[in-house]
Image (cartoon, grey):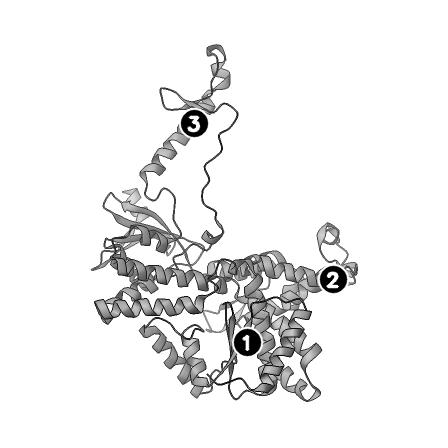
Amino acid sequence: MIPLPQELVDAQARIEDIAHEFGLTFFPVVFEMVDYKQMNALAAYGGFPTRYPHWRFGMEYQHLSKSYEYGLHKIYEMVINNDPTYAYLLEGNTMMDQKLVMAHVYGHADFFYNNMFFAHTIRKMVDEMANHATRIRRYQDRYGIERVEKFIDACLSVEDLIDPNSVFQSEARTPAPSEQAAPEPAADGIGRLPAEPYMDRYVNPPEYLEAQRKKVAEAQEREQRFPSRPERDVLGFLMEHAPLENWERDILGIIREEAYYFLPQRQTKVMNEGWASYWHSKIMTQRVLTDSEIIDYADHHSGTVATSPGKLNPYKLGLELMRDIEQRWNRGQFGPEWDSCDDLAERANWDRKLGLGRAKIFEVRRLHSDATFLDEFLTPEFCQEQKLFVSEENQRTGKTVVATREFEQVKQALLFNFTNGGRPVIELTDANHDNRSELLLAHRHVGIDLRDDWAREVLESLVRIWKRPVRIDTTGGGKRIRLGHDGKSASETHLDERAAS
């Protein structure tokens, strides 16, 4: 690493003081200067100085290096969710660029520190990543590089099979005994409420008894099923129940831990970049820029938030929606009175001068992910102002055209992309399918089919971990199908046809 010049040390101290004045809070921020080769290496490692040895990091580094050499990209900043927060500055950037990056980084640092989706992440992840690297290198020395790397390949192919909601779920509590009389099992196993014989048909009517029979049947079915309920944290289930050697279980745990660490960044891409862009804009334009830097700043900032036809820029979307929320809450454009107003002229000039915007965006930054952020605060007026639309490919010309500008369809398209990070929702439904210890998964289909080749490769990787055949129920071409793999060959069964026969 290159020592930080005194000019940048002074600039950091000033920008940090300004960030505090604006109300941002964060872990201590450490900036390090790197050249472009070091920056590409850090980017290939996900921002960390040390990762476990694996071919994918080398492949990513080669891709980034070639792209940089051909002028296709340039990484200006990189920041890690850690305590302290580490950020990297690219050697050779202008002083204005370095100050812009610093201001942007303090926005990210505040988001990491305060957003609830990051609250459960490991805050000493730089050290944890180094520990992971050491452990995996030891396994490679003991069991061989190829064997360990193949198992890592299998784990990485299923690293998305985790439960995004598990970090917010508390452990199941034992219900407190009720003071009221609880149903008592009778000879037929149905829970009857205690009653005198002459009152039994009123206290336990046939409809109630039938409902109780169904509950008992469902409970017995759940007890026989393993797991008793669909499990989204497939990696966690495999860690507990797959027939793995100790080193394999440890590696699977490493992959799972890192997947949960990176998950909030995937869940909050629009918000995180929008928040950082909002604050670098405030800090730079109101407190930092000199007269000679304004033109360069405007050029670089506009490049950051620029949009291309058919592409969504998370920086632009997040920044503009944050500004829209701030303006609406400053002017009082929310609540029952605003919602019930049908006069377009009155709505256009609506201003209750509440001044609640800044407090509201700080609240939004703390409580939301991209999916809830867009679901709650996207408005028809915002979509119209930002010219948002749903595009599709014209089958005749092959060109991308506007499919619709209808608000509900635009909103649903955005939510589809940002719910579960755009990845398919997969659940483990049966770990003893057909009483043969086979794994059965289910794809929660929401309009897009699984890619057949990817699905088969993932199933093959799961076989390496579970050591038994694995299957998944999904929908393809409008039909219910079951894809499978036994470790040697793939299979496909049409469930509708099987049920009919």
**Dot 2 crowding, Cα within 10 Å, few <14, some 14–19, many 20+:** many
Q: Earlier in the sequence, mark 2 or mark 1?
A: 1
Q: Secondary structure at mark 1?
A: loop
Evaluate if marks 2 and 1 touch, with contact meaning CB atoms under 8 Å apart: no
Return the x and y of residue 256 as percentages of the image width and height. 38, 60
Identify residue for label 3.
212
Quadrant into which the C terminus falls:
top left
At 30% from the left and 43% from the top, the residue drawn is 499
Q: Work out how far the residue at label 2 is from the one at label 1, CA to CA, in angstroms.
A: 31 Å
Is 147 above or below relative to 220? Answer: below
Pointer 2: what residue?
330
Q: Nearer the viewer, residue 347 or 351?
A: 351
Label 1, label 3: how many angstroms apart (C-alpha)? 59 Å
The kind of residue on which mark 1 rests is: Ser
Residue 84 visible (yes or no): yes
Q: Is residue 300 left or right of residue 447?
A: right
Between 288 and 265, which is closer to the camera in this rendering?
Answer: 288
**Vertical side of 415 occupied by 30: above or below:** below
Q: Disc 1 marks which residue?
A: 308
